[in-house]
Image: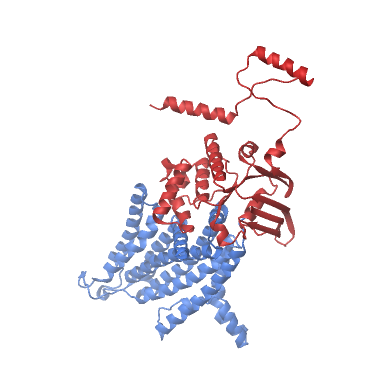
Chain colours: A blue, B red
């Protein structure tokens, strides 16, 4: 029973460390605000395709900001643990370095999932804001949905300030946790709201759930990247980990095309495609796929195996590392 | 039986290219008897902290071997019986002192009422009851050190390794640490202390070793090392000046040598402690 309880204790302490970090909260709030503002840029210019652009824009924000978020979180946890001596204090206890490494990853995973939930829900709302819903009067933005999204962010900040003032939680932690909760409420209310009839319709949910599946795929990709960043953070500085992350993103996005053009040997191509993280798998195009279930299963399997391999490498490295 | 045994223990630190950059510890042979209070002394950069980190398994020796409580330092069974206070006390600043103790107790599998009882007892021992629920980030250096000591004691370790335990502590804190360590040694537990404060080491340690440039240059039981057998001291209470003069005359007649008479002095620490206690007694209603 000791191992699970130590693992849970260590994971939760890393979750708290990240949530108390103002940078994590700032990234989450910024992505939420920008995603909600996307329809402003698209709706009047692109007409009917604005919904698709808002969706893809929101998902792109989730991926790019998520990579920065994961790189920062990995370096913050690893660097702080090393410099402040908290790692040394923990590792002289009957805790193996692998357990600490895995608990750190589990902590990052929970925080990244919360971040992804915030992104996914704002994308869902942005998609609704950009939708054409009164064809008779021409294109217009759904200002009530936009207002509910903006209200969620403002309310999270106000409640966060209140929690901070009453010393129940810090502002950053409260805002970070409240955002996905309030946005879920907003997405539910908006989804069940019948705009034509101007009333709540409890049976018919109108928001596009496939956006959540697409966001889930990106979240899985981010979890894979988090494992890579956590492993790299034992060698590299924060700036280098972020740079390596975007380099990996660029390589992964162009891998299929580059290898198809330049590499004729099928075995070598298959090997390289397995080694280079293939971000294309995590990007679900808004035009849809022929077999979404098979695609989802394949991607989850790919991400699971890849993440496991990276984490094993990270554990081995952390086992060999020294607390200077 | 020895709580610690090192044999030709060596540690090199290498640069990026793998070349030896510094040899922090060189061929160190050390034996620390179980139940003793052992001091590790040396100037800055002499290899004290590196040695302690190898004893706790935080650094890997480059050469030689180390046995701690009969096992390897990284063994789970060894760590279960080990307590360590590093030079820098790593804390999570947002946790309270009580939460920190519960968290570290959990790493030893101590939970529930047992963890609460131990945490409360240790907070009492290190004098942090009043600050038990304050975030550690608000603590002074001395308070952090006291809490670090409590964290090192959470599992009632058989071997306690302390790196500069009195750094940043006020005199009452230093006295508390020393009393605590004496009490542990009396219970048969082994304590190893590294410190620059020679007076503290002299006060409590039974044996010491001195490191210089990573090498052992002197070591052994403190009493034997410091005893000056060519001099003799008599101690008596309340002797008048006339009797002192008579004693000096008698001493010269018997031994043919002059004797020096003076008055013993209190240690500044004792005097300070008495003054503070008196002040506390007078200010309390």
Q: Position of residue A302 (x, y in %)?
A: 50, 79
Question: Which of the pair B9/A78 is nearer the observer?
Answer: B9
Q: Residue at x 37, y 55 (%)?
A: A174
Q: Position of residue B113 (x, y in %)?
A: 39, 53
The answer to whether one can see residue B169 in this image is no
Left or right: where A77 falls relative to A152: right
Question: Can you say which quadrant of the picture contains the C terminus of chain A?
Answer: bottom right
Question: Which of the pair A245/B285 is nearer the observer?
Answer: B285
Left or right: where B268 falls relative to A204: right
Which residue reaches farthest top? B242
Classify residue B193 by image quadrant.
top right
Q: Residue at x 54, y 75 (%)?
A: A277
Q: Position of residue A184 (x, y in %)?
A: 32, 66
Question: Which of the pair B29/A147 is nearer the observer?
Answer: B29
Q: Is residue A4 above or below residue B10?
A: below
The answer to whether one can see residue B172 in this image is yes
Q: Position of residue B132 (x, y in %)?
A: 42, 45
Q: Residue at x 72, y 62 (%)?
A: B18
Question: Which of the pair A105/B81 is nearer the observer?
Answer: B81
Q: Is residue A12 above or below residue A132?
A: above
Q: Residue at x 20, y 72 (%)?
A: A197
Classify residue A230 by image quadrant.
bottom right
Which residue reaches farthest right? B256
């Amino acid at each position: 029973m000791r191992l699970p309880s130590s693992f849970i204790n260590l994971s939760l302490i890393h979750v708290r460390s990240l949530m108390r970090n103002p940078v994590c909260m700032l990234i989450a709030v910024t992505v939420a605000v920008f995603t909600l503002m996307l329809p402003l840029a698209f709706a009047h210019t692109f007409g009917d395709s604005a919904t698709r652009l808002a969706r893809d824009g929101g998902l792109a924000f989730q991926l790019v900001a998520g990579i920065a978020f994961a790189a920062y979180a990995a370096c913050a946890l690893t660097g702080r643990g090393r410099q402040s001596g908290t790692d040394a204090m923990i590792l002289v206890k009957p805790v193996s370095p692998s357990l600490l490494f895995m608990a750190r990853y589990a902590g990052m995973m929970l925080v990244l999932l919360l971040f992804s939930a915030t992104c996914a829900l704002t994308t869902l709302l942005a998609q609704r804001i950009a939708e054409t819903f009164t064809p008779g009067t021409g294109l217009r933005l759904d200002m009530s949905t936009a207002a509910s999204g903006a209200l969620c962010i403002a309310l999270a900040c106000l409640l966060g300030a209140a929690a901070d003032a009453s010393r129940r939680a810090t502002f950053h932690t409260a805002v970070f946790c409240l955002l996905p909760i309030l946005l879920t409420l907003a997405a539910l209310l908006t989804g069940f709201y019948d705009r034509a009839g101007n009333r709540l319709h409890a049976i018919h949910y109108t928001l596009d759930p496939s956006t959540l599946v697409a966001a889930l795929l990106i979240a899985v990709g981010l979890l894979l990247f988090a494992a890579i960043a956590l492993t790299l953070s034992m060698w590299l500085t924060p700036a280098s980990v972020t740079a390596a992350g975007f380099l990996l993103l660029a390589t992964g996005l162009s891998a299929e095309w580059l290898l198809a053009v330049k590499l004729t040997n099928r075995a070598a191509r298959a090997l390289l495609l397995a080694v280079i993280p293939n971000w294309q798998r995590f990007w679900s195009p808004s035009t849809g796929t022929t077999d979404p279930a098979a695609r989802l299963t394949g991607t989850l399997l790919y991400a699971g195996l890849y993440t496991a391999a990276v984490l094993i490498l990270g554990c081995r490295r952390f086992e060999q590392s020294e607390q200077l | 039986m020895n709580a610690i045994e090192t044999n030709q223990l060596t540690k090199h630190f290498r640069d990026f290219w793998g070349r030896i950059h510094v040899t922090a510890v060189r061929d160190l042979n050390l034996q620390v008897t179980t139940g003793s209070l052992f001091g590790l002394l040396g100037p800055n950069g002499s290899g004290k902290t590196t040695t302690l980190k190898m004893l706790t398994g935080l650094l890997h020796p480059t050469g030689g071997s180390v046995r701690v409580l009969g096992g390897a330092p990284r063994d789970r069974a060894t760590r279960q019986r080990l307590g360590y206070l590093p030079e820098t006390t790593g804390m999570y600043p947002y946790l309270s002192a009580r939460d920190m103790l519960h968290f570290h107790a959990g790493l030893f599998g101590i939970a529930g009422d047992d963890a609460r009882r131990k945490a409360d007892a240790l907070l009492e021992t290190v004098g942090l009851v009043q600050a038990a629920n304050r975030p550690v980030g608000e603590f002074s250096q001395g308070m952090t050190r006291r809490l670090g000591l409590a964290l090192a004691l959470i599992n009632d370790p058989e071997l306690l390794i302390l790196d500069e335990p009195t750094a940043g502590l006020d005199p009452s804190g230093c006295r508390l640490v020393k009393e605590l360590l004496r009490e542990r040694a009396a219970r048969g537990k082994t304590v190893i202390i590294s410190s620059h404060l020679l007076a503290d080491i002299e006060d409590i340690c039974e044996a010491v070793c001195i490191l210089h440039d990573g090498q052992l240059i002197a070591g052994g039981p403190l009493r034997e090392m410091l005893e000056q057998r060519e001099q003799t001291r008599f101690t008596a209470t309340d002797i008048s000046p006339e009797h002192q003069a008579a004693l000096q005359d008698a001493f010269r007649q018997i031994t043919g040598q002059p004797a020096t008479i003076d008055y013993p002095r209190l240690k500044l620490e004792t005097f300070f402690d008495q003054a503070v206690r008196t002040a506390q007694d007078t200010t309390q209603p």
